[in-house]
Image (spheres, grey):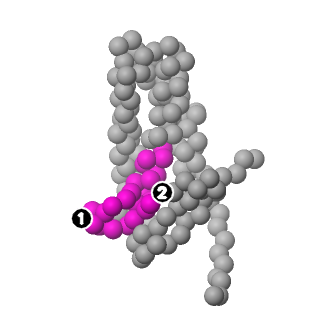
Amino acid sequence: MAKRNVTVKMKADYEYEAVNPQGNKVQIDMYDPEKKQHQSPMDLVLSAVASCASVDAVLMMKKKRRTVEDFIVEAEGDRNDGVPAFYKSIHMKFILVSPDATEEEFAKVVKLSVDKYCSVSASLSSEITFSSEVRSV
């Protein structure tokens, strides 16, 4: 079983930084839109699932020897009104700019990417466990 990990550290009440073992950093904030400088955790969920599915879709189209001039995913999540405000549904619109791809083959690739190959979409229904610890300084 392959494991991945990140460490999230508080920078201020509504600001955090996530770092992986290689030192790659992601800035996160939970400010209201008028003060927002970085993506929120829920924005990052949409970004993660859209980018994960994108990689597989692009690679599959290239494997089919199709030209990929541009590729865009517009992801939109419908959140629960209560607490927790989880995503009840996520819709991703995949847009491929290609002179030689067909709608039918691209639709099949997108379905495979999201349903079979994307680790993030599969993880959205996974079991999550946790532990806690208090340290004194």
**Horizontal placement of 56 versus 128: left or right?**
left
Looking at the image, which is closer to me, 21 or 31? 21
Is 99 magenta? The answer is no
Q: Amino acid at mark 1?
A: Glu
Among the two numbered marks 1 and 2 on one chain, the one whose residue lies closer to the N terminus: 2
Looking at the image, which is closer to me, 121 or 20? 20
**Horizontal placement of 61 versus 79: left or right?**
right
Q: Which residue is mark 1?
A: 34
Task: Give me the residue at 51% from left, 33% from top.
Answer: 55
Q: Which mark is residue 26?
A: 2
Q: Report crowding for label 2: few under 14, some 14 to 19, many 20 or more residues within 10 A (C-alpha).
A: some
Part of the protein shown in magenta: 26-49
Q: Report crowding for label 1: few under 14, some 14 to 19, many 20 or more residues within 10 A (C-alpha).
A: few
Is 39 magenta? The answer is yes
**Residue 33 to residue 3: above or below:** below
| Residue 84 lies in quadrant | bottom left
SS at mark 2?
strand
Task: Give me the residue at 53% from left, 25% from top.
Answer: 59
Where residue 33 appears, x then y in whole percent?
27, 62
Residue at the right extreme, as displayed:
1
Looking at the image, which is closer to me, 127 or 71? 71
**Residue 56 to residue 137: above or below:** above
Residue at the left extreme, as displayed:
34
Q: Amino acid at mark 2?
A: Val
Task: Give me the residue at 55% from left, 18% from top.
Answer: 63
